[in-house]
Amino acid sequence: MNAPQNHQPNTDQPPNPPKNTSSPEITLQEPPRKSPWSFKAKIIRALWGISELLLWKPSPASMTGFRNAMLRFFGAKIGKGVRIHPSVKIIIPWHIQIDDYVTIHDHAILYALGQITIGKHSEIGPLTHLCAGTHDYTDPKFTLLRQPITIGDHCILGPASFVAPNVTLADHTILHPRAALYTNSKPNTQYQGNPAKPIQTASQESTP
């Protein structure tokens, strides 16, 4: 009968280090985000979305008065002689104020999380994007920032131009096609490029 063998413990591997219970546990889970919209606002936004789908978009381009009446019903302030194409996308119409004789061409976007004000006799070109809102990317909750856009009188925004949140366009500002404006403009000045830079004033253009 074989004698029992004594097994010596393996001392080559170091013992497990003690757990550090003092350091906080790291998690990648985002903090909960609370909706910035009240229950009433959500209902009104839903009603506007339905009205936009069933009434606004199918309306003929000539029925500008009908679309202006829709916007007024949902709280927008619309002046006389305003012409808005039915393909224009408007978010939060009760944050919109449009003065007399403004024209907004096809497929423009009025992203009115904040107030958007457009002065009289201004023209918003096709595919133009007025972005009056963003999020605070430095905040883990990604807080909504409702920053306004103000467009002065007799402004012209060329096709596919972009206006960033918290920007004011002075009177007689002209944005060339695809220009992107991130700062306030100067009056009687044309802008071009991304980011948009002044290229000449209206007085310079009229000089022979």
Image (cartoon, rainbow, N blue to C red):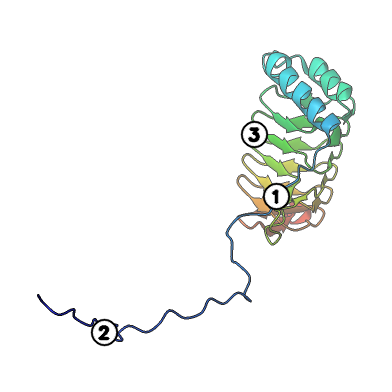
Give the image quarter of residue 58.
Answer: top right
| Residue 7 left/right relative to 147 | left
Residue pointed to by mark 2: 8
Q: Residue 149 at what x, y percent from top left?
A: 80, 47
| Residue 181 left/right relative to 172 | left
Q: Of helix, strand and loop, which one carries label 3?
A: loop
Q: Residue 139 at what x, y percent from top left?
A: 71, 59
Number of labels in the image equals 3
Front residue of 112 and 42: 42
Amino acid marked by disc 3: Pro
Q: Residue 23 at what x, y percent from top left?
A: 62, 75
Q: Is residue 87 above or below residue 54?
A: below
Residue pointed to by mark 1: 32
Amino acid marked by disc 2: Gln
2 vs 1, front mark: 2
> Of the numbered discs in the image, which one, if any, rests on residue 126?
3
Q: Which quadrant, please, contains the N terminus?
A: bottom left
Q: Which of marks 1 and 3 is nearer the N terminus?
A: 1
Q: Is residue 186 above or below residue 122?
A: below
Q: Residue 185 at what x, y percent from top left?
A: 78, 56
Q: Of helix, strand and loop, which one carries label 2?
A: loop
